[in-house]
Image (cartoon, grey):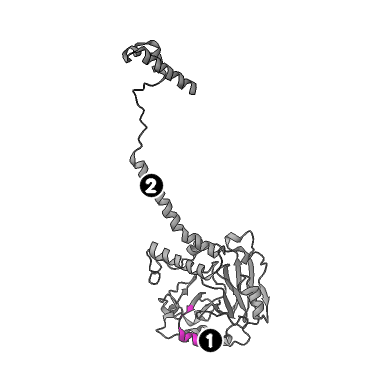
Amino acid sequence: MEKARQQFEDLAKKIDELGLSPETLSSLPSYQKLCTIIPSTHHHHHPVQRPRWHKLLACTLMFGIVIVIAALIPFIFMIMYEIKLLPDRPWIQGLHKELTYVWLEDVMQLDIEDEECIVNNLEEIQDMFRPPVNCSVCANVTQVDRVEKLSSDDFVKYYAYSGHPVVITDATVNWTANSHFTFNFFKSIYDKESPVLDGEDENCQFFPYKTKFENLGEVFQMSASRSMLTDGSDPWYIGWSNCDSTAANILRQYYQRPYFLPTNSESSKTDWIFMGSPGYGAPLHIDDVEFASWQAQIKGTKKWLLEPPPECYLQCQSLEVTVYPGEIIVLDTNKWFHATLILGEELSVVIGSEYD
């Protein structure tokens, strides 16, 4: 290439020395042949100018990508926190909470305190968008243990926070709930103005399951024959959270804090009550509550089906256990999908609470 450039420079000098004009030069056959191979130096090649909208489109796409990544950060952080990829430290817990509030209030423009759900019973949607479970909670669990005289230390060591479900068979020995908790008893402890009955208070949840009841007030209006499971009456199964402090004080006259809970563990102030007919129960679902919970089988017999979350199917197995009157099952309902079925012929009555 360098040699060719030098030859052209020598040729240009020779042309200058001979004093050839451009007209004379262009009439030479050799020059005309050369022009057919190399474009004339008088015709400048201008690069193609791309339309300005190309740059605008590129900038818009880049901006959109940045926005999407920024919007996903809270979700990525929350998922990493939930599956324990981040250390459980106070400042991380605080950041997790703040990011959640920023996303819901500033991005989604929702008032967390006042916003009402458009549709009730969003369990299917919650199941789809829940954070993935760390499969270590169920990987080595092959059965639901049945134990008695469980010390607080052993409860903490083996069950309290491990995700391993357990049934404590002697948990309600000193309780008197078995002889008091009936349909009519629950109906009697609520004043007509109690927020539990209409279910409009966000802290008073009501679960109709397969029934057509709109609230607990309607449940207590059912006929005596249906409430007492008379032959031929329609079966039913419902649940509710007790947000009435007066009723809570009455309830706790008949049951105590489970003896196996450690002294530094606190039960929730909210009691959960489930009651209904044999052959009915809760469909398979997973909860969205703050902590693991205990549930005491006061009357009746209930079979539990426990399923690991889909992401753990290859590492964990399904479990079944039957809970009899006087027994307590401890389960992290945020980690295990669960369904229940009332067995036998007696009304099932269950009371429970969360613990930290």
Q: Secondary structure at mark 1?
A: loop
Instruction: For label 1, count other residues whose C-alpha is less than 10 Å away and answer few (under 14), some (14-19) or many (20+).
Output: few
- The residue nearer to you, when weighing 141 against 180, is 141
Q: Is residue 67 magenta?
A: no
Residue 161 x/y as whole percent? 60, 72
Badge 2 local density, few (<14 within 10 Å), some, or many (20+)? few
SS under mark 2: helix
Q: Write the residue at 45% across / 18% down.
A: 7
Residue 77 placement, left or right of 302: left
> Looking at this view, is 130 or 63 the one in front?
63
Residue 90 pos. (x, y %): 52, 71
Q: Nearer the viewer, residue 145 or 221?
A: 145
**Residue 231 location in percent, x, y?**
54, 78
Compute the Cα span from label 2 to label 1. 64 Å
Residue 160 vs residue 178, the one in the foreground: 160
Residue projecting furthest to the front: 17
| Residue placed under numbered mark 2 in the picture | 59
Q: Which residue is mark 1?
A: 252
Magenta-colored stretch includes residue 250: yes
Q: Residue at x 38, y 71 (%)?
A: 114
Question: Which of the 4 image quadrants contains residue 119?
Answer: bottom left
Q: Amino acid at mark 1?
A: Arg
Residue 302 lies left or right of residue 290; in this view the side is: right
Q: Which residues are magenta?
A: 241-253
Q: Are marks 2 and 1 in contact (CB under 8 Å)?
A: no
Identify which amino acid the numbered label 2 is placed on: Cys
Residue 175's place in the image compared with 115, above or below, is below
Of callouts 2 and 1, the N-terminal one: 2
Q: Is residue 26 above or below residue 314?
A: above
Tell me what residue is drawn at x 49 percent, y 64 percent. Answer: 126
Q: Quadrant of residue 57?
A: top left
